Amino acid sequence: MANFKISDAVTYVGVDDKDLDLFESQYDVPNGMAYNSYIIFDEKIAVMDTVDAAKTDEWLENVGKALDGKAPDYLIVDHVEPDHSGSIVAIMGKYPDMKIVGNAKTFQMLEQFFDGVSFDDQKIVVKENDELSLGSHTLTFIMAAMVHWPEVMVTFEKSEGILFAADAFGKFGTLDTDEDWACEARRYYFNIVGKYGMQVQALLKKAAALDIKKILPLHGPMLTENLEYYIGKYQVWSSYTPEDKGVTIAYASIHGNTAKAAKELAKMLEEKGAEKVSLFDLARDDIAEAAEDAFRYDRLVLMASSYDAGVFPPMEHFLIKLRSKTYRNRTVAIVENGSWAPSAGRVIKSYVDEFKDITLIEPVVTIKSALNADSRAQLEELAGKLV
């Protein structure tokens, strides 16, 4: 990604990684990933975060072109996760007089990631609402602990109303990816930030007091218009409120009979007027996308085969994901399949019981090996309850 101006004083110097297959070694990113970095030019020059070590050389070239022979006075470190801090040592070597700005936890973590590197002579430690003047631009540092790491802060530039938002308001995909923001931002939010809704709400409360005109995240596009839309999405997502009415069916099928039942249930729901039916094969589909839709819609059906006196592992993996991301405030139904001693329902329910504010539709529907007239009638009844 070539450098470009965001304003007369702010230049984008980030990079796109089109070769990345798995973000954080677990999330499919078919359109790659953007690592965003910015420079503010004033009487003093500030670089806003670095990029993943895989893109250090390209990023340093972008920084050098933008600086055009000048040296930066400050590097602001809003987030220490390696995809943003991976090039810190490289830029320190190139600009040894540059000061590093972060909070106390920032430097604690940097020392953990970069063993043997001393930041003592260059560090400036800031705390909540501290300010740093660059000239006509003033940076205010706002702590955003656990959005989604404990050292995270965001930086607000007053004169232009720019919020450098760290990982908040980010999305999967490179900057030149032509796609709707909400879909990949939602998948990014619930799978990466989603556990920390309370902390996101606290940050949104702080942000409400600021006159924000632009949001510049560390991933994804710069948000410069219709900010109410993006902030509104974050309000909904972080409050665990269902975004849309609909039913997500997540199934884990060994030999295909549970899959057939899931597809029949989906058809029943559509025929009864369900607003939206979203169907996922947990053994084959992207589990992160399944989690996204489980959070997006207000109803969830969990359907799985019994396995080794428990539940088929793809379902358990999904349930662990939902639990870790604080799944709550939804209506849930359970369908189990077992040829003898069905056990899937019991295991699924043990996880659902840990979720908060759940309305559980009972009874659990049990299929014995394959759908028959009796279990099909139970599915029909369940579809009626869901709609």
Image (tube, rainbow, N blue to C red):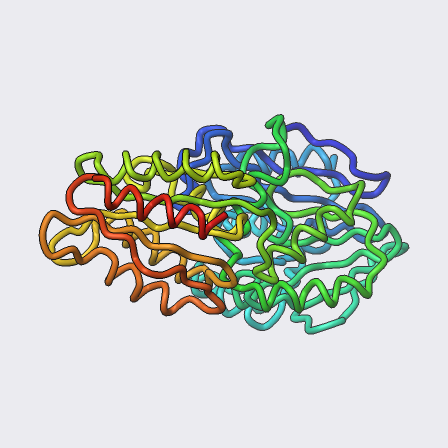
Note whether residue 121 is visible: no
Viewer-proximal residue, 156 or 104?
156
386 w.r.t. 65: above or below: below
Viewer-proximal residue, 6 or 13?
6
Q: Is 188 left or right of 367, judged from the image as shown? A: right
Residue that appears at 79% across and 41% down: 224
Note whether residue 303 is visible: yes
Viewer-proximal residue, 307 or 21?
307
Residue that appears at 80% across and 56% down: 157
For this orientation, the residue located farthest to the left is: 340
Q: Is 237 left or right of 350, judged from the image as shown? A: right
The image position of residue 99, as x and y in percent, is 67, 60
318 w.r.t. 173: above or below: below
The quarter of the picture where the N terminus appears is top right
Residue that appears at 59% across and 58% down: 241
The image position of residue 222, as x and y in percent, is 71, 40
The image position of residue 220, as x and y in percent, is 62, 40
The image position of residue 84, as x and y in percent, is 54, 49
